[in-house]
Amino acid sequence: MATRLLLPRAPKTLFQLLHLDSAPTTSEHFRGIQSFISTSSFSHGRFSSHGARSMVSSSIPLLNTADAASSALPLDTRVPATVSTGFLGSGKTTLLNHILTSQHGKRIAVIENEFGEVGIDSSLVASHSSVAEDIVMVNNGCLCCTVRGDLVKMLLKLVKEKKDKFDHIVIETTGLAKPSPVIETFCSDELVSQYVKLDGVVTLVDCKHAMRHLNEVKPRWVVNEAVEQVAYADRIILNKVDLVNDVELDTLTRKIEHINGIAHIKRAKFGNVDMDFVLGVGGYDLNRIDSEVHFESCHKEYQHCNDEHGNHHQHHHEHKHDAAVTSVNIVSEGILDLDEVNDWLERLVDEKGEDLYRIKGVISVNDSTGRFVLQGVHSMLEGCPGKPWGPNEKRINKLVFIGRNLDETSLRKAFKGCLL
Ligand SMILES: Nc1nc2c(ncn2[C@@H]2O[C@H](COP(=O)(O)OP(=O)(O)OP(=O)(O)O)[C@@H](O)[C@H]2O)c(=O)[nH]1
């Protein structure tokens, strides 16, 4: 199975990029993306090397470094799209109605999918919407691999025919859908990624029933949709808190953090959250990775858990090799050898791409005055220079891996091997 890596070996370009003395401008940012863009694609649930595609592209043609240096790039004008997912009855339609009736100043286009001939959800949504311009499109079927083509068609129809009528797209998946094919549509479909950018995956969790679904043991090779929906999330809404007590809520929160250590989590009744929490989250935006990779609990531990070299500490979950979907967070001070990181991540996505759901990171690399940020889905990875480090700022690398069968021990070991 062929895959591509994050950081192609182009030392000259790389070092030019990493020597930026200040935060990158928009054009520098795109230069970075372009330079490090992955070229693997995902088709029918399997990685393939056919048809080089970019994970994040834009309406801007990708420039080479020399061109970028002399051009001012236009703003990224692609329409942001939010994918709302969650188990059956978790509150997706309730949240959607909340989005459609809240005052956030955005005109929303909705793509719904539902089974059956009678569109119950769509009539619920349509009747609640207070904004005349909102557009609701319904797809009768599951937006999974089999109908991914329909999603592409609907997205392209929206952006081509109704472009001026909306500012944001919300895609509600059915409760039993795996979110990955929908996410991959944005990452791997060249046409879609020219017009639309994935803003974030919002997962609704029914606090009353989620634990049962998350713990359900599936036959080998059968995906537990509830776990996947949590694993891919940028934002998680623990909904229906009125139906559980504090102990149940805390246990569920820990379980969810164990699966996804990076998503922001909010508790809610009837999907009632601030719109900032679900719209405009920039979950796939390299510019925002720095603020996303926060690891609050790790910051606390950092003071206690430095090893003898002062450069490593364990996350509070001691899971060495877990067949389930989990997160491994690495927070460590130090400077990494970029070539070593390059080799490591290349090997990792090559061997484990299918099991790696998300990667996000902010790292400090040799000869750079600024952070290097990276993010990826499966074997599609991208990175670019980020904000400069402050003069007295500790260079703390933060990396999070969310995936299946993650071998925490070997991830930490490989990371350590990259430290200078
Ligand atoms: N008690 C309680 N009920 C809620 C809450 N949020 C939603 N509900 C109810 O839960 C039921 C399911 O909510 P929906 O929004 O339709 O859930 P959904 O995820 O769209 O459901 P499917 O489309 O069937 O997967 C509805 O009757 C909602 O009114 C909540 O916070 N508390």
Image (tube, rainbow, N blue to C red):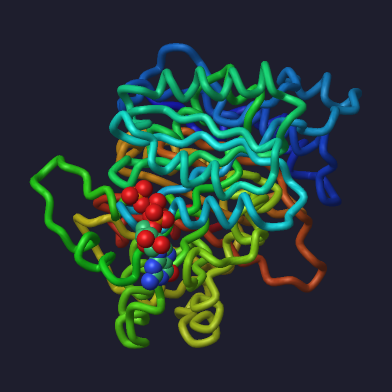
Quarter of image, res 34: top right
Residue in front for this viewpoint, 84 or 342: 84
Judge left or right: residue 192 versus residue 188.
right
Residue 232 image point, x, y percent: 42, 49
> Seen from this angle, which residue lies furthest top?
51
Residue in front for this viewpoint, 364 or 278: 278
Judge left or right: residue 68 versus residue 184.
right
Residue 84 image point, x, y percent: 47, 47
Instruction: Name the residue at 67% across, 50% down.
Output: 280
Q: Quadrant of the N terminus?
A: top left
Residue 281 image point, x, y percent: 63, 53
Quarter of image, res 140: top left
Q: Is residue 327 visible?
A: no
Task: Tell me the quadrant of ligand 1.
Answer: bottom left
Image position of 358 with respect to 389: above or below:
above
Instruction: Name the residue at 52% across, 22% down.
Output: 154
Instruction: Name the residue at 46% across, 39% down.
Output: 122
Residue in front for this viewpoint, 353 or 231: 231
Q: Is residue 52 visible?
A: yes
Residue in front for this viewpoint, 7 or 119: 119
Residue 229 image point, x, y percent: 36, 51
Judge left or right: residue 389 versus residue 286.
right
> Seen from this angle, which residue lies furthest left?
219
Instruction: Name the residue at 71% across, 48% down.
Output: 287
**Numbered-mark total:** 0
Q: Quadrant of the C terminus?
A: bottom right
